[in-house]
Amino acid sequence: MHHTPSTTKPPKVGFVSLGCPKALTDSELILTQLNAEGYETSKTFAGADLVIVNTCGFIDDAVKESLDAIGEALAENGRVIVTGCLGARTGSDGASNMVRQVHPKVLAVTGPHATQEVMDAVHLHAPKPHDPFVDLVPAGVSKIGIKLTPKHYAYLKISEGCNHRCTFCIIPSMRGDLVSRPVGDVLAEARALFESGVKELLVVSQDTSAYGVDVKYRTGFFDGRPVKTRMVDLCEQLAELAGPHGAWVRLHYVYPYPHVDEVLPLMAAGRVLPYLDVPFQHSHPEVLKRMKRPASGERNLERLLKWREACPELVIRSTFIAGFPGETESEFQHLLDFVREAQIDRAGCFAYSPVDGAAANLLPDAVPAELREERRARFMAVAEGVSVQRLRRRVGATMQVLVDRAPALGRKGGVGRSYADAPEIDGTVRLLPPEKASKTLKVGEFTRARIVSAEGHDLVGQPI
Ligand code: SF4
């Protein structure tokens, strides 16, 4: 019989999204496309025609979580398409695909950033609903699409992949070399987001400071005006777009290259948040060399102090690795001194853990697991001391706070964040009930708050 797609009941697609903010934006692109083509999406596996699992393959725990999610979807639904970083990993035999090896019943497997391949698999296994209206809408009509983050903040991915080859990381082997998105597209997406009510834009990539390197900082166009594909130019334009909406622009994954200095005046002028997420990973030049870190030859401490001079409000968040192969006690001490001297506001630390396929596994003088763990704990004790001290200085100050939670219009208080807190990774500002009965708090709106105390990683503020 000739197959006629049903016009009455659109196919339902279940969706599981795992992994980092970059994976989240991939999920959003797929969901947007599904929606534009008239598919329905479902949060449960049972009622769906098939399930898409967007996986993460960064560390062993994430691999396990992803494989478990695929297993669960197979058990409950049976028809599963796998995408994301884990989908790009090879199996233990070095030849086959890891996901297929563990779960041979999956319908299709793609790597990250593969919206079209995922859609092809969906079309094959749950044919597209025919809807004369939808079919007339050109693909990509929605610039904003579906956001998985709360509506008042959104991630803006400016590039894919990475040109570095840090020895502990397998992202480049999964995602390939740096590919910058055209600056006009990035800015159009940012504008659409601000227009839809986004109050905080989080710029993400693997290496934000390298934006445009792959296209030799080519001049693109936005609104008929030439704009260079370059970090500083991008920041300037984002600030311009955010201004009329009173919205925040926050930069993640920035390496301490000299040209980042040029962004500091934008921060000092309050046009881009004075917040930099700089994944230093270590401070000792020899360790950085063994890690093959970007900007490892830079004088990081001096650069940082210069940045703080240019913009005293600057908040630095960073991540570090303790117990990297070959790390001596004195190299580790260097790291502790760095955190104290650089006054890192927010620091995370991992005990080094070998990732399958990473070059660092072959380095000599592995640090024993207990010592790695011990150094991580010592690091965190020092970092927390710095962090708490810096937070305490804010008591008495008035800060602008973006409200994330406020039940009953904030009559019993709420939770928000200041410029110093990125969502999900940093602390929060706990908001007390407003003193004035007429004052309300609304999710996605700003309030001013007088900081009354500091509690661990968080602040407590009185809305005014
Ligand atoms: S900069 Fe290094 S750690 Fe970051 S994605 Fe590139 S290779 Fe991995």
Image (cartoon, rainbow, N blue to C red):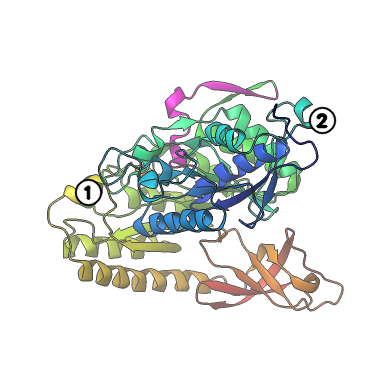
Q: Nearer the viewer, residue 205 or 464?
A: 205
Residue type of the residue flagged with mark 2? Phe
| Residues under numbered marks 2 and 1 in contact, where contact means CB atoms less than 8 Å apart | no
Helix, strand, or loop for circle 2? Answer: helix
Q: Position of residue 270 (x, y in %)?
A: 62, 49
Q: Quadrant of the C terminus?
A: bottom right
Identify which residue, 418 or 197, lies in the foreground: 197
Mark nearer the N terminus (2 vs 1): 2
Q: Is 210 inside the magenta-drawn segment?
A: yes
Quadrant of the rendered image containing residue 333: bottom left
Residue 370 horizontal/vertical position (percent) = 22, 71
Q: Residues within 10 Å of mark 1 (few under 14, many from 20)?
A: many
**Label 2: few (<14), some (14–19) or many (≥20) C-alpha neighbours in 10 Å:** few
Q: Is residue 248 above or below residue 444?
A: above
- In the structure shown, which secondary structural element does the residue marked by tag 1 occupy? helix
Numbered tag placed on residue 137 in the rendering: none
Instruction: Please state which of the two labelled residues, at mark 2 or mark 1, is closer to the viewer.
Output: 2
Disc 2 to disc 1, C-alpha distance: 54 Å
Residue span colored magenta: 205-223
Give percent across and percent down for residue 171. 37, 43
Above or below, 252 against 327 in this view is: above
Residue behind mark 1: 360
Q: Which circle marks residue 133 in the picture?
A: 2
Marker count (numbered): 2
Residue drawn at (32%, 41%), measured in percent from left and top?
90
Quadrant containing the N terminus in the rendered view: top right
Q: Quadrant of ligand 1?
A: top left
**Which residue is rendered at x = 59% and y = 37% of the image?**
125
Asked if residue 6 is positioned above or below residue 328 in the image, the reply reads: above
Residue 432 placed where, x, y %?
70, 77
Asked if the residue at label 2 sits under 8 Å from ligand 1, the reply is: no
Residue 7: within the magenta? no
